[in-house]
């Protein structure tokens, strides 16, 4: 990868990061803070590893929801493992947090593997 490609990739990665204060003000509602675990790369449709914090503007997001999230390496699938995280917990990382892209239909997601 040459220097220009690297710079472009980083720009795209950081363009997914939004200022939560601005988003919250423009939508006239406060974003929720949730914890997710990414889908395991080797064992599909399972979610393991470290918990990562994201902002969410999905009104009724709950534990167990499957979501699409932006990561440094592109979009990933994740499962919500915790909701209503206190702002104090994310104080040091809030400038780096991203917003969940969308919720994925859980039934459809888990039934994909049965037909393969």
Image (cartoon, rainbow, N blue to C red):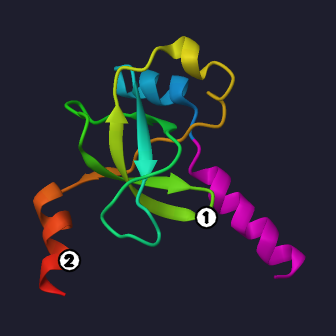
Main secondary structure of the magenta stretch: helix
Residue at left 48%, top 62%? 75
Q: Which residues are magenta?
A: 1-17
Q: Magenta stretch containing residue 70, yes or no?
A: no
Of residues 65 and 56, the one nearer the viewer is 65
Which element carries disc 1, helix, strand or loop? loop
Neighbourhood count class around disc 2 (C-alpha, 10 Å): few under 14, some 14–19, many 20 upward: few
| Image location (x, y in percent) of residue 83 | 34, 26
Describe residue 13's horizontal placement relative to residue 20 as left or right.
right
Q: Quadrant of residue 62?
A: top left
Q: Residue at x 38, y 54 (%)?
A: 47
Q: From the image, tell me which residue sits under label 1.
A: 73
Q: Quadrant of the N terminus?
A: bottom right
In the displayed structure, 102 sits above or below 21; it is below
Question: Would you identify the image quadrant in which residue 100 lies?
Answer: top left
The residue under the point 11% across, 60% down is 107
Instruction: Indicate which disc residue 99 carries.
Output: none
Task: Give me the C-alpha separation between circle 2 and circle 1.
Answer: 24 Å
- The residue under label 2 is 113
Question: Where is residue 5 drawn, in percent x and y?
Answer: 78, 76
């Amino acid at each position: 990868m040459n220097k220009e490609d690297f710079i472009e990739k980083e720009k795209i990665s950081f363009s997914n990061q939004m200022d939560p204060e601005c988003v919250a003000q423009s939508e006239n509602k406060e974003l929720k803070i949730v914890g997710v675990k990414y889908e395991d790369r080797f064992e599909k449709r399972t979610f393991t590893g470290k918990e990562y914090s994201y902002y969410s503007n999905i009104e009724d997001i709950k534990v167990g929801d499957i979501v699409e999230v932006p990561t440094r390496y592109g979009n990933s699938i994740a499962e919500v493992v915790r909701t209503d995280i206190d702002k104090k917990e994310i104080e040091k990382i809030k400038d780096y947090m991203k917003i969940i892209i969308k919720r994925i239909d859980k039934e459809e997601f888990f039934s994909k593997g049965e037909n393969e």
